[in-house]
Amino acid sequence: MRRINPSVFFVAIFAAAFFLLFCKEEGFHQRHWAFPLESQGSITVDPNPASCGSCHLQQFGSWKSTLHSRAIGPGFLWQLPRIGKHGSENCMNCHSPNPETKTLLLSRLGWGEVTGSSWKQGSEENGIQCASCHLRKGKVYGPFPKEGNEDRIFQNSNIPHQGFIPQKEFEESEFCKNCHQSPETAKQVNGKFLMDTYGQWRRSEFAKSNVQCQNCHMPDRKHEWKGISDPEMVKSGVQTSLQVLPKEEGAEIISELKNSGVGHTFPSYSVPKVYLEVWIESITGQKRKVSEKTLGWMLDLELQKEIFDSRLSPGESAFLHVSLSKEEFSKVKRVEFVVTVDPKEYYKRMFQDNWNYKDTFREDTKSWVLPNLKKALDETNSAKYELVRLQWKK
């Protein structure tokens, strides 16, 4: 048998290693979400979501009610003059990813002009829209069709975009990563990324069990992306209980909230807060709060300092324990365990603080900033809701 020259062997190994390290083709996720996104150029497809909705009616109807569709809302808009053109462009990578919609929005702030764009004025108000995820360089991408739908999709020759390019990556958590995970070089507070939802999922049993973001936030491919702002979605991810245990010397109240089905910490970001409270009503009708706890990541307004972090990892529980004497328990008529969710708690504090100092804003920005800031503040103040109220009666 012919012997292999050792020097030739090692050269081959080195060449293969060099190729794997430096010449390996980028993965789909890296290409698809390379910020800033490239311009679509000249396209024949109308990128307006309403146009997509003429064929994809269910997806369009769901999308209209989502936070994705409102990513360019007053809470985002009022901040743009303060953070400037460059900072605004960075924020728009996720809030308005397409360069055409960025240009339209920046022009409204006097930071450029729109010339020869096929994207209509108003497209920038659609936030994260169909084209943000599905359109690249005039080509439409999407997940592989579900079993049984192949013929209906691929044999329709009348569709305006001549079909689409199927990619399995649309059903992987990594597809959501670029906008829901801080990059490795990003700022950290007490060693934690401001956005770590993908990382929290990656470290959880959900990832090990191949449960993807889309399984919970896009069940049956519904374009709803429900989260902390949706009570039913939150209820599906937690378990609550209330026990009142009489004893010889009185009673013990034990209430629990468990992160039973959320694939990341509950809540995930520093914005939402969840309030746990135990209330007692006496036989005379008087009510008093006897225990409370806040779940969340509390940061200061400048996002520089951690005040506390009481978020629940998947499978973890928070308890409230209350001990009552025999005399106290004899006067109890009712016990309640109340869980309240404030999905925009940090925004509420931050917006209110800025509104308090609204007179200090530059005069040339007030006509843009103040109306949007007021709307944003009103929205955050109305976002709080009661999730659960459990009762025990004597």
Image: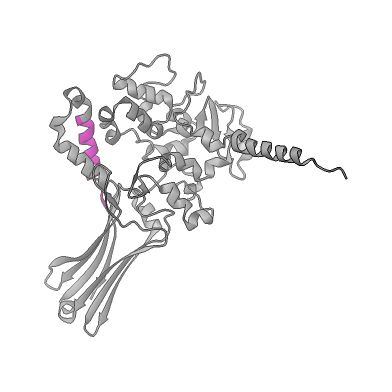
The quarter of the picture where residue 87 lies is top left
View extreme (right): residue: 1
Residue appearing at x 32%, y 25% in the figure: 85
Query: Would residue 281 appear left or right of 102 to someone viewing this image?
Result: left
> Which one is nearer the viewer's eye here, 310 or 1?
1
Residue 151 appears in the figure: no
View extreme (bottom): residue: 248
**Looking at the picture, does residue 324 appear above or below residue 336?**
below
Assess whether residue 379 is covered by the magenta stretch: yes
Residue 132 x/y as whole percent: 45, 32
Query: Which quarter of the figure is the C terminus placed in?
Result: bottom left
Residue 25 x/y as whole percent: 60, 34
Give the magenta range.
370-385
Q: How many marks?
A: 0
Query: Would residue 338 appear left or right of 66 to someone viewing this image?
Result: left
The quarter of the picture where residue 250 lies is bottom left
Query: Would residue 58 appear left or right of 191 to someone viewing this image?
Result: right
Residue 240 x/y as whole percent: 34, 64
Residue 262 x/y as whole percent: 42, 55
Assess whether residue 63 is covered by the magenta stretch: no
The quarter of the picture where residue 13 lies is top right
Magenta span: predominant SS is helix
Query: Which quarter of the figure is the N terminus placed in?
Result: top right
> Which one is nearer the viewer's eye here, 162 or 100?
100
**Looking at the picture, does residue 193 appear above or below residue 289?**
above
